[in-house]
Image: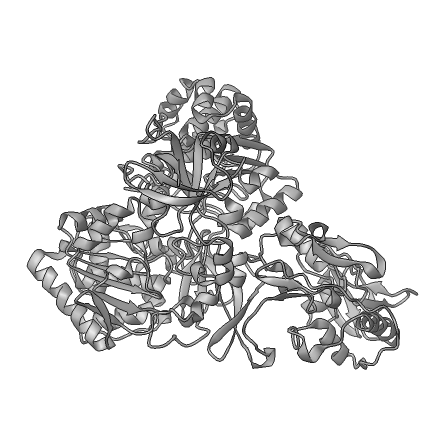
Amino acid sequence: MTNIKIKINNQTIETDSSKTILQAAKDNGIIIPTFCNDDRLDPEASCRVCVVEIEGQKKLQTSCSTKVQDGMSISTNSDKVKKSRNEVIELMWSSHPNDCVVCDANEDCKLQDYMYQFDIKSENKYDGFKRTFETDKSNRFFYIEPDKCILCGKCVRICSELQGVEALGFNQRGHESFISFAYDKGMDFSNCVSCGNCVSNCPTGALMEKSKTKFRMHKTTKTRTTCPYCGVGCQFDIVSQDNKIVKIEPLNKLPNEGLLCVKGKFAYKYVNHKDRLTTPLIKENGAFREASWEEAYTLIHKKLTHYHNEFGKNSIAGLASAKCTNEENYLFQKFIRKYLLTNNVDHCARLCHASTVSGLATTLGSGAMTNSIAEVKNNEVIFVTGTNTTETHPVIGSFMRQAKKNGAKIIVAEPRKIDLAYDADVFIQIEPGTNVALFNAMMKVIYDEELYDQSFIEKRTENFEAFIKVIKDVDINENAEICGCNVKDIQEAARLYATHTSGIYYAMGVTQHSNGTNHVKSIANLALMTGNVGKKNAGINPLRGQNNVQGACDMGALPNNLPGYQKVYDETVRAKFEKAWDVPIDKNVGLQLPLIVNGAFSGTIKAMYIMGENPIVSDPDITHVKEAFNKVDFLVVQDIFMTETAMFADVILPASTYAEKDGTFTNTERRVQRVRKAIEPIGNSKPDGVIIQELMQKFDPNYTIKTAKEIMDEIAELTPIYQGIDYDRIDETGLQWPVKDKQHMGTEFLYPEEFGRGKGYFTPINYKGAAEKPDAEYPFILTTGRILYHFHTITMTGKNEEIMEMYPENFIEINPISAKKLNLKQDDYVVVSSRRGDTTAKVHVSKDIGEKVIFMPFHFADGANMVTNTVLDEVCKIPELKVCAVAIAKV
């Protein structure tokens, strides 16, 4: 890269030789029109609108594909340029429908804009071919109107090169050419995932969202914020009008780089849904009635005070929320600890990544993703296990496919042949719960073939000798039999992983086990053994499932941790918080979520306060959970809808969504990002943080309500890993913790020199199977997970009718051979039963799952968690949601 000087329109510009003319112009505020160009793609120069005149050259050059040279003099608006550019635009216009006034893309169409900007008259010079094609409405979220397509090809390239799906393509040739799904048979015959990235980037109205809301762009407001769904933390603009969200536009910022999934792009309808809770409710004689905020607060204060005084502080428990902001989770745990004086506070991370926190904190020093999302594209090897990444974290899944196109190798170890398995260089179909057997076998290969990093082990780790004794005794053939795979695949995977810069990506398929902590420690062993942690483009990368599950953990919504993973049993830590909060902090670890539920069942937990969680659907053995909640004397639920859990409440407090509040979320890569208020709270609902603070005033009339910005300042004062964070510093791009001070720019990847605990710790781990195994009565293994179109307990996605049309009910995936043995066919209904309960599900016959295993999504009420196992990991108390024995009977 060399600095050079060029002239654009007689303006001298300093740039570097690696840039194109278009890039250099853009960097200096000079706008050159484009249709086909996208900063994320290599230039194709197909639309010819970006032509410029270069002094000394006879032909015009496309600015998107022409590199700058020292001394180059360029004109973007000469007569020659104007004539060529205008002719191209006029030719496009001549075949266009020219119906701007009634077009849904009116005021949001580049062709329309350029016609106006370059003063091109709408009458046609060219009596050319008029494009007349049928509109394709086969996708539930958007339609394709080929009449309005200018054939720039951007949608096709984005679908293929960025999304990695290749659902769109060109059909026919010449004037008859048009864009469509594969073979022009509609979405159902394609592999389209409805991400809408084609829609977001179409320069005309050829690809448009199916919207039931009429709006004009000049009347809308755009508000940048962070997506409320998975842990990627995608950045987008909320486009709103009249206090209603009308569409979502992705931003080409970190971490998503302009990509979204179907939920982020289209599943926003819940925000303005008619069923939103809009006023406090109090249950009397088994029925809810409306109440004022003052009445609700007074009752809550009276009841919580009563149970605290009558039965002791530990008779009360609170559940915070991975869907609420950092500031709100900080306030919630502060309320529980300061005003109720108990550490009985937890949230849904207990059900998903508690074993990550316990496992990685022990082996490395911190229970978080070590590397960054952007690094995925630069991994030499990507090892995917326990995560169906293209469905659960779709943008990261797309980056994995981009890496594959760039030459990366992919290893997938999963019970199902997930979508990424079809891209994999090595696919190992393991039985659920056999992760440790697989990892130990891989490490046996690495040890036997001397592929481990001896220097790294000696300098940066400890306890290797005790660990390697276990590995030396591993029988690869025996472990392959346990996993249900072949030895050759294990060997190939081990060699690939050990001999490259490799990143491991995992989620609940690794963590949700009765030995989940050891599963995570085993992953740490593998990374430490090969030196694939503590460096760029590698690492151990747990993919967090919800928008702020990382942040809720960071904020101390855990029974053993104050904010920043500072231990409640550490006297120095307690002294700091006691001084800041002016109250004694209990030194005893509180109850974890499953033990809170058990306490409610046994009667030791008398009162509960739940913010934005739905344990009646999300927790294992729902029958037991319902019985427990029926026994709670007093239950407060704070949520946006009447959830299954809210139905059990004595008081319901109507909360606001992410679109109605300010704050921050922390994504899976530890990036703290802004959440910005786009619309006013719906009805009489209030942001969770406001509710908690107004309730605090009932306990302390002198408490002064703080803004979200002020709360973050308090967090930074008390939390070392957030010390350098404030709203001004993260306004444009979020920072990744630890952020050591106000000058520190955050931490892209962890442990470049030493681990959080000093040296990385090897843990000797022998394989131990799941607590429940199939037998004659319950012959199948049930495993659970998320699907692309739904999110957790469908409180949000369930309010989007397009999604519910696609996935309205519970289902199982079953192998064709197993289905045949049970006389089952596609769309039959079955009863799936375990030792704890049963549920009804629709049959989806799939060759992607093994004969002994069935899969069921955990989204639906009275669904998978009617049968899942409550047995807990003894270290972190995570339930074994991923493995249980079940029977299947046709309805």
Q: Quadrant of residue 104?
A: bottom right
Left-right relation of 883 to 749? left
Residue 835 lies, with reference to residue 611, above or below; the image says: above
Q: Is residue 247 left or right of residue 41?
A: left
Question: What residue is at 32 percent from the left and 64 percent from the top?
Answer: 642
**Residue at position x 70%, y 69% in the image:** 204
Position above or below: 462 against 721: above
Left or right: where does residue 368 sit relative to residue 583? right
Q: Nearer the viewer, residue 81 or 785?
A: 785
Q: What is the x, y in percent for residue 16?
A: 72, 59
Q: What colouring method underlies this structural image?
A: one colour
Q: Nearer the viewer, residue 680 or 737?
A: 680
From the viewer's perspective, is residue 223 above or below residue 362? below
Between residues 774 and 653, which one lies in front from this camera angle? 774
The image position of residue 251, as x and y in percent, is 57, 64
Report if residue 716 is visible in the image.
yes
Image coords of residue 712 (percent x, y): 36, 66
Residue at x 52% of width, y 21% of height: 487
Quadrant housing the C terminus: top left
